[in-house]
Image (tube, rainbow, N blue to C red):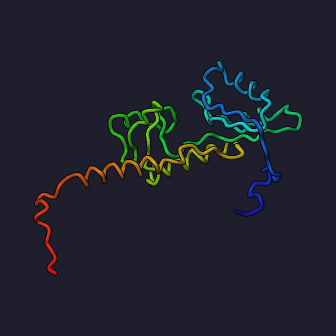
Amino acid sequence: IPHYSFLSSSNQKKFYSHSFLYLINPQRYNSKKAYLEALQKAPYPLMILDLSFQDSFLTSKDLARIRKGRKGRNPILLCYFSIGEAETYRYYWKKKWFHHPPSWLEKENPKWEGNFKVRYWHPQWQQILFQYLKKIIRAGFDGVYLDIVDAFEYFEAKYKQKKQKSDLIPSPKGPSSQKKKKI
C-alpha cells in the first residue's frame, strides 16, 4: 500500500477515534433536511452512513452540508457498502428477482429480511457493485465501510454440507464392487 494519497483532498494524518456514528437506517427523520441538520450537529469524528435517504442519494452538496459548521473538525464520512448480500430496498433490486432470480442470487438471509446472499465473484454482481461504488465516489464520501466481507463463510458451509450429504450416499454398486488389490 503506498504511503501517499490518490486524492488531494484526503486526510494525510493518522486518524484515531474513540467514538463514531453508525446510522444506516435514517427512517426516523421526516425529511432530508432534518436528517442533514442532525448529522451536522452530531459530535462524532467518524460517521458511517447510507448512500440513500428514502428514494434519493446523498449528494456532494449534502455531504458538504454535514461537514459545514464543525469548527474545523470535519468528520470522516464513510458510506455503508454491502458486497456479500443484495438488498431488496436498493435501487438496483428488480422485483422480478423474487420469482426469477439471477444465477448469482442465493437464499434470503434468515437473520435479515430482504437481504439475499450473492455469489460475489459473479461478473453481473460485480458490475452492480462497481456502479454503486461510482455513486459513492460521486457523492464525495471519504471511503467505504464494507459489510458482509465474510460471505465466503456461507459458501464454505454450503459446500461442506453438500459434501457431507454426498459422502453418506452409498455407491450404486455397493462396497463389494470395489476392486481388491492382489498382494
Q: Where is residue 136 drawn, in percent x and y?
A: 64, 43
78, 134: nearer the viewer:
78
Q: Where is residue 39 drawn, in percent x and y?
A: 74, 28
Q: Is residue 41 left or right of residue 105?
A: right
Displayed quadrant of residue 118: top left
Extreme residue toward the front, this view: 183
94, 76: nearer the viewer:
76
Displayed quadrant of residue 20: top right
Q: Residue at x 12, y 59 (%)?
A: 174
Q: Where is residue 38 drawn, in percent x and y?
A: 74, 24
Q: Is residue 55 above or below residue 101?
A: above
Extreme residue toward the top, this view: 30
Q: Residue at x 17, y 55 (%)?
A: 170
Which quadrant, please, contains the N terminus? bottom right
Which quadrant, please, contains the C terminus? bottom left
Extreme residue toward the right, this view: 71
Q: How many marks?
A: 0
52, 171: nearer the viewer:
171
Displayed quadrant of residue 68: top right
Q: Is residue 152 left or right of residue 24?
A: left
Q: Is residue 56 left or right of residue 158?
A: right
Q: Residue at x 14, y 61 (%)?
A: 175
